Image: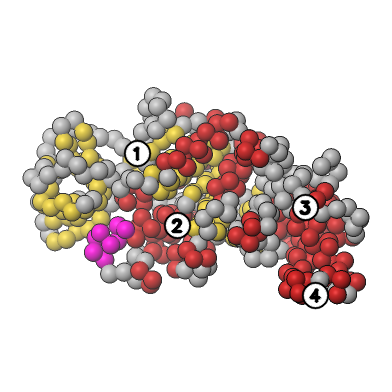
Amino acid sequence: MVRNEEQDSIGTVVEIQGPVIDIACEVLPPLHRALVAHVGDEPYTLEVHQHLDPTHVRAIALHRTTGLRRGLAVFDSGGALRIPVSAGCLGRLLDAFGDPLDGGAALEPEAYRDILAEAPPLGETRASRGILETGIKVIDLLCPFVKGGKTGLFGGAGVGKTVLIMEFMHAIAHLYQGVSVFAGVGERIREGHELWRAMDEAGVMQSTLMVFGQMDESPGVRFRVAHAALSYAEYLRDTLHKEVLFLMDNAFRFVQAGSEISGLLGRMPATVGYQPTLSSEVAELEERIVSTSRGDITGVQAIYVPADDMTDPAVSALLSHLDTSVILSRTQAGKGIYPAVDPLRSTGKMADRRTLGDRHYAVAEGVREHLARYQELENIIAMLGIEELSEQDRRTVLRARKLQRYLTQPFYVVSGHTGIKGVSVPLADTLRDCEAFLNGNYDDVSEEACYMRGTMGEAP
């Protein structure tokens, strides 16, 4: 942010409780104003969250509070938290203030942007324009991404949300020559380092910007890092006019940070202990992920599902803003089906005949019908064996099992770990192969020959 050297302080610190700072002021600064206190040469940024009375405000520290004390002078920065923006931000690893985390030089700013910018006016926004192919078979076939829309990857820990996000970044860079902005919200330092190195090894870091608010940082930083990353995405959309992919891992930690701040401010909890401002806080972020005449922003968010409960208030608040919901299943992962997408629960608002076209819609429905029938018959097969099924059901089950394995796919970003070269499959090839499965053309092919490959025309 811009740190001006103000001549006169606007108040003094009167109380410190963890990251909560109470400040006495003669003139109250507006809500969300960024204030600065100095301990020696070290600046400490505070964000105003409450007006307590006519002479006191309550702020949340965005740094550690070590060294702060009562009576310390507080200065007004002149606005909300601001970050430096520059076309040179691509390929960099930054924190919520725009400062480098990769050991490189500081950004040479072309301008500064408020991280709490409002969403574009309705007249400037542009409607979603068809689907965005990713080269991932199960996604493109059953729950395609909406260009300029918002997609959520729902699942518990360890089912592959981060790996999918990394593969999307690879696809945008190679298929569309677009750019990606990654917001690491509450990321573990180890995970952030591994992701950074994996992106560098995959050769897409030069078209990627990563913004991290790490797990050990103040809840104020973890709450604002997504806004800072989105400000960079808006800048790249407005200046480069390219396809911008905005990724957030993990959106649930954004809600958690807001809940922490709400508790620190003394607000009464609402449903299931979440903050009473949950819906408005989520909307402030989500409504900025839009496309305008200057370019597109397509959002992909990993969303942790507590106790696998899709009715959780945080999950429901995020779900209401999404165009596509990709549900990752631990059952699929346990079977070795990667990506572990649940094909029957994953849906898209634009996955209709008008958007997809007759052929794509018919193939997707045929695949779902086969997989749904297989799921219905699984218990019978487990108890009595597949030989007890009718000939038609037996044929449906065998085709469904092959389709299930065909929809697995080796990824580029983990090829170093798996030893299998990654593949990207055009939608036209996926539709052709799935049609052939449904028509019985591959009834003589073994299930193993369908697993972890690209198209059926390629050598396994």
Disc 3 to disc 1, C-alpha distance:
44 Å
User: According to the image, label 2 marks what residue?
Assistant: 252
166 up-or-down from 32: above or below: above
Nearest to N terminus: mark 3 or mark 2: 2
Residue 113 shows in the view: no
The three-letter amino acid code for the residue at tag 3 is Tyr
Q: Give the residue pinned by disc 4.
A: 384
**Which mark, residue 348?**
none
Which residue was labeled with disc 3? 406
Q: Residues within 10 Å of mark 3 (few under 14, many from 20)?
A: many
**Amino acid type indicated by mark 4:** Leu
Front disc: 3 or 2: 3
State which quarter of the image contains the C terminus: top right
Q: Nearer the viewer, residue 320 or 60?
A: 60
Q: Main secondary structure of the magenta part?
A: helix
Give the Cα distance between marks 3 and 2. 31 Å
In the picture, the disc for residue 97 is 1
Query: What range is drawn magenta here?
Result: 260-267
